[in-house]
Image: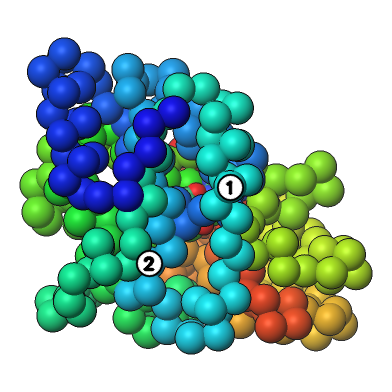
Amino acid sequence: MYHFNHIADLKKYVQEQNLKGKSIGLVPTMGALHDGHASLVRASLKENDVTITSIFINPVQFNNKEDFQSYPKTETADFNFLKSLGNTAVFSPLETEMYPDSPKMALDFGSLQVGMEGKFREGHFNGVGIVVGKLLNIVKPDRAYFGQKDLQQFAIISQLVRDLSFDVELKCVPILRSEDGLALSSRNQRLTAEQLKDALIFYKSLAMAKSMLKDDTPLALVTERVSAAFSASNVNLEYFEIVDPTTLEQIDQYNAETNIALCIAGYVGNVRLIDNIIIGNEY
Ligand code: AMP
């Protein structure tokens, strides 16, 4: 498995692959890899000659210092995991390599960032946009893979790619869940056995909301029931929003003809988790 820490070395490898006419897939991650990440890597391995997985805990996208410092770091296990998936190259730069000095630009994604993660994690999408823009510039992949788990992130990266004319095809990979429905997340590693059970409320309430909407329950009542379910649990609800999956505009009336996304975030102890489901055509 090829492993690069430096941008110049990675670029050289990319140039060699380009000269050989190989297509390149990029899978950006922050490490602490799990089977959810594996589904992105597998999709890339299937659709490209070469897959490059980046592992970089991007400081610029964290609005909460404690969250950044406690983000799980499992580099050796990550490398072994990637090796087990097939022939991928890994890019794991140091912070100083990616940011020799602090970025001065600020990205604003307008209406796409006013709700949900954008509302509760100030500056988050500025950081996401900068790091993804950098990675797309460094690797210039044919395809880049992201998870539906970060639905708002996907909408924002799609906008970034359109606004700056990046020549890349974006792929959105469905959420991988544990058997009991919990969306796989690197942050799940920080939960106790008890908290892992508590965290099932995310998927359970999304499933409840989905079936209520399909029964034509008014949206306000659905939201109220989700809030009530969280109030009766050990998990603090941060938001539950019903939005258009692409524009992220709030939806005030359910219509079986159009896709809608139910998005949720909350805290299990001091661990923040997010989840969503799309009703209609899934990605
Ligand atoms: P992260 O390392 O958390 O930044 O995630 C890297 C990529 O993996 C992002 O595009 C995520 O949306 C995606 N991802 C994370 N968890 C899952 C999951 N359970 N299923 C599918 N994709 C995921």
Marks 2 and 1, the one that precedes in the sequence: 2
Q: Nearer the viewer, residue 67 or 230?
A: 67
What SS does tag 2 mark? loop
The answer to whether residue 280 is above or below residue 22 is below
Residue visible at 27% across and 68% down in the picture: 96
What SS does tag 1 mark? helix
Q: Amino acid at mark 1?
A: Thr
Residue 133: image quadrant is: bottom left
Tell me where residue 145 appears, x and y as whole percent. Answer: 39, 40
Q: Amino acid at mark 2?
A: Asn
- Residue 23 visible? The answer is yes
Task: Look at mark 2 in the image and give the residue it sits on.
Answer: 58
Residue visible at 27% across and 56% down in the picture: 132
Is 245 left or right of 185, judged from the image as shown? left
Q: How is the image coloured?
A: rainbow
Residue visible at 48% across and 33% down in the picture: 41
Q: Residue furthest top?
A: 20
Q: Nearer the viewer, residue 18 or 4?
A: 4
Q: Nearer the viewer, residue 70 or 114?
A: 70
Q: Nearer the viewer, residue 280 or 94?
A: 94
- Residue 154 visible? The answer is no
The answer to whether residue 82 is above or below residue 175 is above
Is 41 left or right of 185, judged from the image as shown? left
Tell me where residue 261 appears, x and y as whole percent. Answer: 52, 56
Task: Look at mark 1 in the image and give the residue it sits on.
Answer: 76
The answer to whether residue 152 is above or below residue 122 is above
Tell me where residue 277 appears, x and y as whole percent. Answer: 59, 52
Mark 2 or mark 1, which is nearer to you? 1
